[in-house]
């Protein structure tokens, strides 16, 4: 498999606020606030670059300072930014997250309007990016039509496709495309949304994973937080892997690191079971840190 990865998805500025004490609603809370680069696709691309993978990112940005902020960060970590698409008249996406004192997401606001204006035509304008790709990573922030165009380009070059459902609402963008996905990494809530099934018990989760597999996804890997992972590959039965213990500092970005870990393992020719372990290792590392992405030594 070619070692180059093309990531197609969202890139935005993250504004994070960490509350120092118990959350007091409808009033001001003492805490710390900082700005960083974010977005599911962008995070996956940066994680892969830190792991030493050759990676290009295709994502829409506005022609504004936040867009340049994102571009500079990607260039610093070694992501190929040649195929970032700047859309005139649009603002770069912004994600505002409030984290409680335990490191858990309290509430978030996402302004990703720029993604609604990113069309298959924009994607085809940077079609050359797909040449030589072994893996094409997709995030469901994009419309079904744009995702379909990305999958078509991946198929043309023989690349495998890895899809992150992103959220309950966005996960439905992938439903018409399931039979064309190599690997899908839904959370518990996304698994429920995509199948319409209850996913409380392990038996429920296994049944929902089997449902997605029966609808064409070759490998389904469902992340269940502190309950670990349920995965199904080819014609085997669903298997469970325990979560790796980690001190919780901030859960933001853990799912993106998990997906990057799975991709990294696939590029090395490892099995899905090994990919799950690799993904869990990276997710645990992120959860225990204040960063949403992996950091190079010395950073």
Image (cartoon, helix red, strand yellow):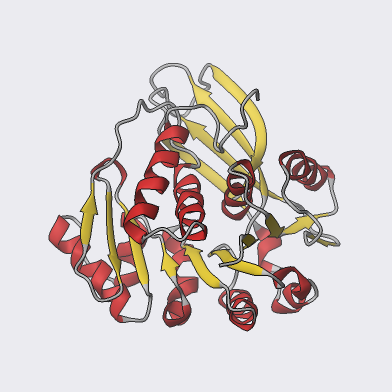
Rendering quarter of residue 184:
bottom left
Q: Is residue 7 left or right of residue 284?
A: right
Quadrant for the C terminus in the image: top right
Quadrant for the N terminus in the image: bottom right
For the point 57% across and 73% down, the residue is 159
Would you place residue 5 above or below residue 76 in this image? Answer: below
Residue 155 horizontal/vertical position (percent): 58, 81
Would you place residue 138 above or below residue 35 in this image? Answer: below
Rendering quarter of residue 244:
top left
Residue 98 horizontal/vertical position (percent): 51, 33
Residue 265 horizontal/vertical position (percent): 46, 54
Q: Is residue 8 visible?
A: no
Q: Is residue 67 visible?
A: yes
Rendering quarter of residue 206:
bottom left
Residue 292 horizontal/vertical position (percent): 54, 37
- Identify which residue, 171 or 271, lies in the foreground: 271
Q: Is residue 198 left or right of residue 62?
A: left
For the point 66% across and 35% down, the residue is 36
- Identify which residue, 202 or 14, lies in the foreground: 202
For the point 69% across and 70% down, the residue is 132
Q: Is residue 123 left or right of residue 44?
A: right
Q: Is residue 74 left or right of residue 286?
A: right
- Identify which residue, 22 or 149, lies in the foreground: 149
Q: How many numbered badges does the structure rendering display? A: 0
For the point 33% across and 81% down, the residue is 215
Would you place residue 271 above or below residue 182 in this image? Answer: above
């Amino acid at each position: 498999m070619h070692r180059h990865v093309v990531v197609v998805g969202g890139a935005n500025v993250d504004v994070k606020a960490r509350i120092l004490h118990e959350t007091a609603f409808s009033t001001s809370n003492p805490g710390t606030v900082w700005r960083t680069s974010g977005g599911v696709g962008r995070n996956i691309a940066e994680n892969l670059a830190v792991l030493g993978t050759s990676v290009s990112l295709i994502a829409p940005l506005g022609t504004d300072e936040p867009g340049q902020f994102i571009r500079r960060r990607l260039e610093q970590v070694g992501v190929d930014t040649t195929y970032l698409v700047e859309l005139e008249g649009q603002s770069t996406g912004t994600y505002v997250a409030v984290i409680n004192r335990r490191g858990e997401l309290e509430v978030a606001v996402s302004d990703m309007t720029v993604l609604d204006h990113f069309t298959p035509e924009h994607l085809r304008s940077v079609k050359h990016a797909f040449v030589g790709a072994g893996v094409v990573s997709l995030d469901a922030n994009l419309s079904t039509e744009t995702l379909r165009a990305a999958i078509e380009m991946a198929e043309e070059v023989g690349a495998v496709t890895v899809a992150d459902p992103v959220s309950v609402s966005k996960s439905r963008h992938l439903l018409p495309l399931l039979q064309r996905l190599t690997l899908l990494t839904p959370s518990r809530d996304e698994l429920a949304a995509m199948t319409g099934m209850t996913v409380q018990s392990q038996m429920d989760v296994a049944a929902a994973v089997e449902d997605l597999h029966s609808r064409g996804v070759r490998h389904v890997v469902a992340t269940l937080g502190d309950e670990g992972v349920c995965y199904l590959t080819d014609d085997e039965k669903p298997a469970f892997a325990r979560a790796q213990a980690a001190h919780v500092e901030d859960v933001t970005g853990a799912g993106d690191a998990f997906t990057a870990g799975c991709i990294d393992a696939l590029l090395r020719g490892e099995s899905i079971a090994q990919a799950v372990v690799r993904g869990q290792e990276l997710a645990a590392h992120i959860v225990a840190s204040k960063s949403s992405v992996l950091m190079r030594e010395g950073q």
